[in-house]
Image: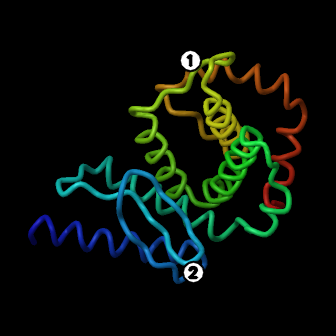
Amino acid sequence: MPEFDKNSQFLKSNAAAMRALAGGKDHKVTYAGTDAHVGNNEVRLPALPPTATETQRNSLRGAADGAALWLAHHDPKTHQKHCPVPEGAKSIFEAAERARVEAIGSRLMKGVGKNLEAALNQRYENHEIDAPGGSDEAGISEAVRLLLREQLSGARPPKKLSMVMDLWRPWIHSRAGDLLQQLLDSLDDQ
């Protein structure tokens, strides 16, 4: 079978698996760019290179699983009702929600957890997080997502980020206090 056909079949299977994991949602799935996006009726997943490696396929499975979990366990109305308005707070809130929905899938299905880990490793292959106190405000939401993921599912951050996460852990814990444990106790309650 030609490589193009293998990729085409993989993409169709990946989209079908995403819809099934999402609870039978019938979203249109397209592949473009490098990031996933979940809309009201469509999901855009990262494009697969023509000569994709197994690592890239696993990363794409992780992007699809993340989108499916978002569709299955995230309520947009509840999110809108509680989402803060200031941009920094909003990005932290959304990072925490992403960690919550992915933790649900990771805890219930080990294969989904491995796929999500592959997607995160791919994401942080070329993306770094600054240490606390830096000028990159996006680093806070990224660190919150990774720390909550660890707290909620037991999944460690990508190895490449282990040193910077060792700096973020006490910084976040000093500000969040017992809130992280409360989130663990109410994982299914958005």
The one nearer the camera, 34 or 158, is 34
The one nearer the camera, 87 or 144, is 87
Q: How many marks?
A: 2
Residue 154 in the image: x percent, y percent?
66, 40
SS for callout 2: loop
Residue that protrudes farthest toward the front in the picture: 86
Residue position marked by numbered label 2 in the rendering: 25
Quadrant of residue 80 within the rendered picture: bottom right
* Number of residues whose C-alpha sits closer than 10 Å to that of mark 2, classed few (under 14), some (14–19) or many (20 or more): some
Along the horizontal axis of the image, is 142 left or right of 12? Answer: right
Kindly report which numbered mark, 1 or 2, lies closer to the viewer in this rendering: 2
Residue 129 in the image: x percent, y percent?
55, 26
Q: Amino acid at mark 1?
A: Met
Along the horizontal axis of the image, is 22 left or right of 124? Answer: right
Colour setting: rainbow
Q: Amino acid at mark 2?
A: Lys
Question: What mark, if any, has residue 101 been given in the picture?
Answer: none
Q: Give the Cα distance between marks 1 and 2.
A: 39 Å
**Image marks 1 and 2: residues in contact by CB distance under 8 Å:** no
* Number of residues whose C-alpha sits closer than 10 Å to that of mark 1, classed few (under 14), some (14–19) or many (20 or more): few
**Which image quarter is the N terminus in?**
bottom left
Is residue 19 depicted above or below 148 in this figure?
Answer: below
Residue drawn at (63%, 17%), measured in percent from left and top? 134
Residue position marked by numbered label 1 in the rendering: 163
Residue 135 in the image: x percent, y percent?
62, 20
The one nearer the camera, 174 or 35, is 35
Residue drawn at (38%, 51%), measured in percent from left and top? 34
**Which image quarter is the C terminus in?**
bottom right
Residue drawn at (72%, 42%), measured in percent from left and top? 87
Along the horizontal axis of the image, is 61 left or right of 133? Answer: left
Along the horizontal axis of the image, is 168 left or right of 50? Answer: right
SS for callout 1: helix
